Image: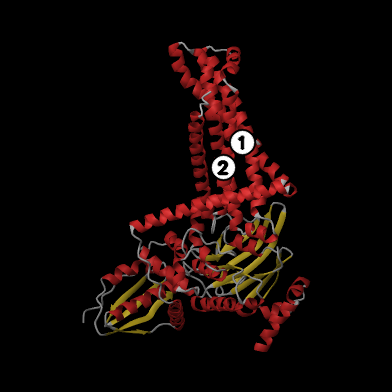
Amino acid sequence: MALSMGPAEKVIKISGLRTRFGETIIHDNLDLDISRGEVVALVGGSGSGKTTLVRAVIMLLKPAAGSIKLFGEEIVGIGDGPAFRLRRRFGMLFQQGALFGSLTVRENVAVPLREHTRLPARRIAEIADLKIALAGLPADAGNKLPRELSGGMLKRAALARALALDPALLFLDEPTSGLDPVSAGAFDELVVQLKESLGLTVVMVTHDLDSLWHATDRVAFLGEKRVIGYAPMAELVTAEHPLIRAYFEGPRGRAARGQICTAK
Amino acid sequence: MMASTSIPLASGDSAAIRRDQGRYRCEGRWTLAGIETLDAQLQGMPWATGTLQLDGSGIQAIDTTGALQLLNLVAALERDGRRVQLVGLHEEHRELLELVRERRAAAGEPPPTTPPRNRLERLGRWVWHHLRRGGDFLAFVGEAALALGQLIVHPRRFRWRALFGNVETAGIHALPIVALLAFMMGVVIAYQGGRQLEFYGANIFIVELVSLTMLRELAPLITAIIVAGRTGSSYTAQIGTMQVTEEVDALRTIGIPPMNLLVLPKLLALVVALPLLTLFADALSVFGGMVMAQIMLDVSYGDFLDRFPQVVTLTSFLIGIGKAPVFAAIIALVGCYQGFQVRGGADSVGRQTTVSVVQSIFLVIATDAVFSVMLGSVGLWR
């Protein structure tokens, strides 16, 4: 794995990216670098292409132009074999969970393990149970079907599956949306813990201002089809760009910042 | 003490334990990829008794899976009555181990799995489940009838647009496939029967054979089966998906009974469309037989059409067409009912769609048999 990864190693390097759906251009000439061990959030108004950007990086969407390097490997025009090997190294938490409805939570977590390792079934079940515990679910959740879980538990189960292969890179699409404040806070804490103990790189799409303040190292603001601001949160909120100001200067933005300032 | 028992490191990602002067050194990469070889090593490991030291300073990398392995190893050794000291771990590795330990403790023990049920109990549950499903279906039919009754009282509430849309998709769009299959059925029946008739020199009786078989039995049945596969399944899939995405609940919340919007237009559309499709299938299948009669038996189109009204009574034709609305009601009601039975997600939609097609085809054929017996017993043979 990390054969030559220094601390400043770029896990993701996007340059000149252009994506589009039919005639609509989503990103144009977008550049973004994410270093190893960073927690980076993608923010921006609705329709600014946050999820689309993640989908392009995880090879679900073919860019129209530009280059995306994942762990130093170019993924635009990548072959099936290298793509399969790369997929082992990142996990994705989809917005709606995207758990397989016919499988129990434990079986869901075991799917990537069965696909990518040759471990015996007993060992896989054990690892799956660990991931379920890591995601903060009680042990009996493993035997349940996704439809028997509440929204918050579903998110955690989906996180457990994303963590199944101990990926070096984790993508989270709105991980805290639909969670109660306590669960959302616990989720943020978990992300930070995983980053610190595993050296995980995390890319998350979020609107949760508390997550932005508490869990991220840097925040990339998407607007006008590219990244218009990329800085730690405290710096980003002082940016002059009108889109960024409009985003953070609302009453909610102020409230979240106020809390931080009084806490410090 | 023996010389150090070493197990060679495999190339690439690999975890290992090496015995070294009474210490056990953990080495290599304790990662998901690395632990695959570990189980085999641990099998033949000569563990000392009493207190032993596990030295983690040689671990190059560890992830949660590796941490789990290490914790499991310690637990297994302690279960056998040894005391284990874990020493030399890097600070980050120790933190990770702590995280894993903490989270597993927080999750608690998995509940004991319920013992498998015995055969008798399973059979009982199966029968009970199906009886209840049967009762549910009857309740659904009753609800649909009530809604239909209300519709007659308040005809303004009816959703004509949905009705016409359904007639178009269930009826008009099915014309080509119905035409093709009915024509081929006519050809096949004429071909198979014609051989026998030719043998006896009774060529002209091909008219009776094809017309009666087709008009009375096969055309209604074939059409109903095509429609069950084509339209009944789509009803189930549509309502089932709406059930998954909570659209059905949204309708209820807005105050639109799903029965009125989703079921009645489909039911009535099919009751209108299926007899018309059957009529169409009648014509095409007789035409198929006619073509075959001309080619194989030298019965010209003229002769065929001359004899046709003499041998086919209006009753036979009406019996065939008359079955169609009944089949239509079965297909639409089963299709919609199974749609509402969807729970959960995509797999449930698939399962109920299968059930819907199988059940509606079964019920159509069973009903057809009942029709045959009933009509025969009142003497309507022709």
The answer to whether residue B147 is left or right of residue A113 is right
In the rendered view, tell whether residue B266 sits above or below residue B39: above
Residue furthest to the left in view is B1
The answer to whether residue B162 is left or right of residue B336 is right
- Looking at the image, which is closer to me, A86 or B48? B48
The answer to whether residue B36 is left or right of residue A151 is left
Residue B341 percent across, percent down from the top left = 54, 54
Mark 2 packing: few (<14 Cα in 10 Å), some, or many (20+)? many
Say what amino acid the circle numbered 1 marks: Leu
Number of marks in the rendered image = 2
Per the image, label 2 sits on a secondary structure element best described as helix
Residue B17 percent across, percent down from the top left = 32, 75
Regarding residue B184, the answer to whether it shows in the image is: no
Q: Please give the name of the residue rendered at 60% of the width and 65% of the height, measured from the top-left corner.
A: A95
Q: Which mark is residue B331?
A: 2
Regarding residue B193, the answer to whether it shows in the image is: yes
In the picture of the structure, the residue carrying the numbered disc 1 is B274
In the rendered view, tell whether residue B20 sits above or below residue B374: below
Q: Please give the name of the residue rendered at 46% of the width and 21% of the height, measured from the top-left corner.
A: B192
Say what amino acid the circle numbered 2 marks: Ile
Chain bearing mark 2: B
